[in-house]
Image: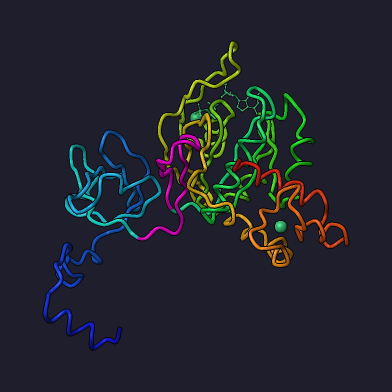
Amino acid sequence: MSIHEDDHTGFDRPRKRSRPRTKDRPNYSALPVARVVSIDRGRYRCLIEDRIVSAVRGRLIARKGIIVGDEVRLDGDTSGDEGTLARVVEVLERSTMLRRSADDADTFERPIVANADQLFIVTALADPPPRMGMIDRILVAAYDAGIAPMLCLTKADLASPDELRAAYEPLGVPILVTDPEADLTPVREALTDHVTVFVGHSGVGKSTLVNRLIPDAHRATGEVSELTGKGRHTSTSAVAMELPEGGWIIDTPGVRSFGISHVRPDSILGAFPDLAEYAEDCPRGCRHETDAPECALDDAVADGRLAPERLASFRRMERAFV
Ligand SMILES: Nc1nc2c(ncn2[C@@H]2O[C@H](COP(=O)(O)OP(=O)(O)OP(=O)(O)O)[C@@H](O)[C@H]2O)c(=O)[nH]1
Ligand SMILES: [Mg+2]
Ligand SMILES: [Zn+2]
């Protein structure tokens, strides 16, 4: 249909407008921008410059429309003084959004954080024991969201990181290892000037690490239950904190599972340009799994273009979908 025909139909039957036109909407661009650092019973705690401002949701913003990490514009009283409340009138466009579903049967997506550019998959080497299935699922969610994942292995005083290193190094996932005495310089270097979300099981030591990195964070930490070997969900909501060196950490509550029903399997290949290139020679609809007939990734291994460990790690991650 040409533009003129379109104009003509528009002239005969004016379309109903459900939303005000852009030019009718208030212009908020002069209002200050703040970052949402935590959410508590409908109140948004936002950081502007060096002060925390408490705010409520403006009526033009959907209920679930504001999450930790969001950059928002605030109207009203932004003094941050005791008893004052500002109003969130605009949520700025997000660079990323990390989501999960409770499990794969549940298609309801829960947004976790906005605007993170890095994700630490925090995994204890023992107590609770590591589960590769969980790591793989979080990796999938990170690649899908366009957030760079890193594996942060804690409790190296209790068990060796060798097995997990062997499983994830071929994939190119950066690995950091810590214990209570570890020098955290490499961790700080990885975090500086990034917005990094910490994700992992309860009890793996996310908040412990946050407290060591940001001494005035005062995050509560919990004992791992002797009976179940599982943490007790000490942290109950996501909180964003600024690093003294620059950048942000977002500590999140422990998760039991990490559903990825919102992710399309083929979106993962895009995170691995070398594999994506070899896969161009795959038969149509190839899922690249271990027994996939004539999968070009097997050919790439057979003629030495691709390391077998890298393909094995990739296929293990792909299996997170089944
Ligand atoms: N041995 C050992 N214990 C650790 C290490 N890091 C943390 N812990 C202990 O693990 C327990 C749980 O730590 P938290 O920091 O509360 O764990 P979390 O991941 O924040 O847990 P949730 O908030 O429930 O998700 C605490 O008793 C910590 O002291 C470590 O490197 N080695
Ligand atoms: Mg915690
Ligand atoms: Zn294939």
Residue 179 % position (x, y)? 68, 31
The stretch in magenta equals: 93-114
Per the image, is 225 magenta?
Answer: no
Residue 299 % position (x, y)? 82, 60
Q: Is residue 229 above or below residue 184?
A: above
Image quadrant of residue 239? top left
Q: Determine the quadrant in which ligand 3 lies.
A: bottom right
Nearer the observer, 52 or 305? 305
Q: Measuring 53% from the left and 37% from the top, which residue is drawn there? A: 258
Nearer the observer, 107 or 54? 107
Image quadrant of residue 82? top left
Residue lying furthest right:
303
Q: Is residue 157 above or below residue 176?
A: above
Nearer the observer, 130 or 10? 10
Image quadrant of residue 282? bottom right
Q: Measuring 14% from the left and 67% from the top, which residue is drawn there? A: 16
Q: Measuring 60% from the left and 37% from the top, which residue is drawn there? A: 122
Q: Measuring 32% from the left and 52% from the top, which residue is drawn there? A: 48
Per the image, is 113 magenta?
Answer: yes
Residue 210 % position (x, y)? 53, 36
What is the quadrant of the N terminus in the image?
bottom left
